[in-house]
Amino acid sequence: MSDRSSAWIYIGGPITEEGIKTLAEAIYNEGIGDDWDTRFKTEDEAEAHIRPAIEEGTSLHLFKNEVVGGYFGDLEATCRELDLTYRRGDNGHYAYSATAVFWQPGMIKLPDSLEVGSHAASNSDDEMLVGIASVIAVLDKEGPDGLAKWARVLQEHFLADIPPLTLAKATVPA
């Protein structure tokens, strides 16, 4: 029996038409859907769920039961590659605590094996916990000033609303 829990992810920020296709592919491949017990059956169906969020000016909300490890590795990596803000959370498992992870463009990019910021708590606890490996990685990469900036970004934005998905124009290289 593998370590599984229910997990969710909220995604927002500017995205290009090409980015929509990339995000839809990642969502489909992750086997995630718009409700706990559903999944998108095709990439087109996933894309059809993305577009109303853009049109309505909301963030994208996705859910899944039975998530191995409680995280969406490839989908989260795609969000970082597309510079989309996201917050992901899970309910935990007897083998690990519940977590939530927040990322936004401009944050220091750490190796995928390190969570950017995690919040392990009960439903009534709002204390943010960050793994020491992440702290050391930021300190080594950015020094004390970079660590302080990173901590402030997490503190200011971790529990904030995720921005809406918006359609961005593709940039043409000069």
Image (cartoon, rainbow, N blue to C red):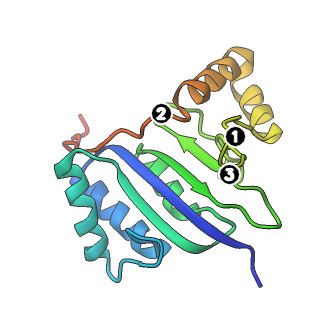
User: What's the amino acid at mark 2?
Assistant: Ala
Local packing at callout 2 (Cα closer than 10 Å; few below 14, some 14-19, many 20+) is few
Rounded to the nearest whole Å, what is the CA distance between mark 3 and mark 1? 12 Å
Out of 46 and 110, give the one closest to the viewer: 46
The single residue placed furthest to the front in the displayed view is 124
Left or right for 114, reference 105: right
Label 2 sits on a secondary structure element that is loop
Q: Upstream in the sequence, badge 3 or badge 2?
A: 3
**CA–CA distance in space, label 3 to label 2:** 16 Å
Q: Nearer the viewer, residue 123 or 7?
A: 123
For the point 23% across and 40% down, the residue is 171
Image check: 105 left or right of 102?
left
Q: Position of residue 138 (x, y in %)?
A: 71, 31
Relative height, residue 129 to residue 77 (above, below): above
- Which amino acid, by three-letter code, is at mark 1? Asp
Q: Is residue 143 left or right of residue 29?
A: right
Q: Position of residue 100 (x, y in %)?
A: 62, 49
Q: Which residue is mark 3?
A: 99
**Relative to residue 107, is residue 80 depicted above or below?**
below
Residue farthest along the top direction in this orientation: 145
Q: Secondary structure at mark 3?
A: loop
Q: Residue 110: x percent and y percent?
A: 65, 42
Q: Residues within 10 Å of mark 1 (few under 14, many from 20)?
A: few
* Residue with the mark numbered 1: 125
In-front residue for pair 166/74: 166
* Residue drawn 48% across the image and 37% down it: 104
Give left or right: position of 85 versus 103.
left
Q: Residues within 10 Å of mark 3 (few under 14, many from 20)?
A: many
Return the mark for residue 160.
2
Quadrant of the drawing holding the C terminus = top left
Query: Which circle's residue, 3 or 1, is located before the other in the chain?
Result: 3
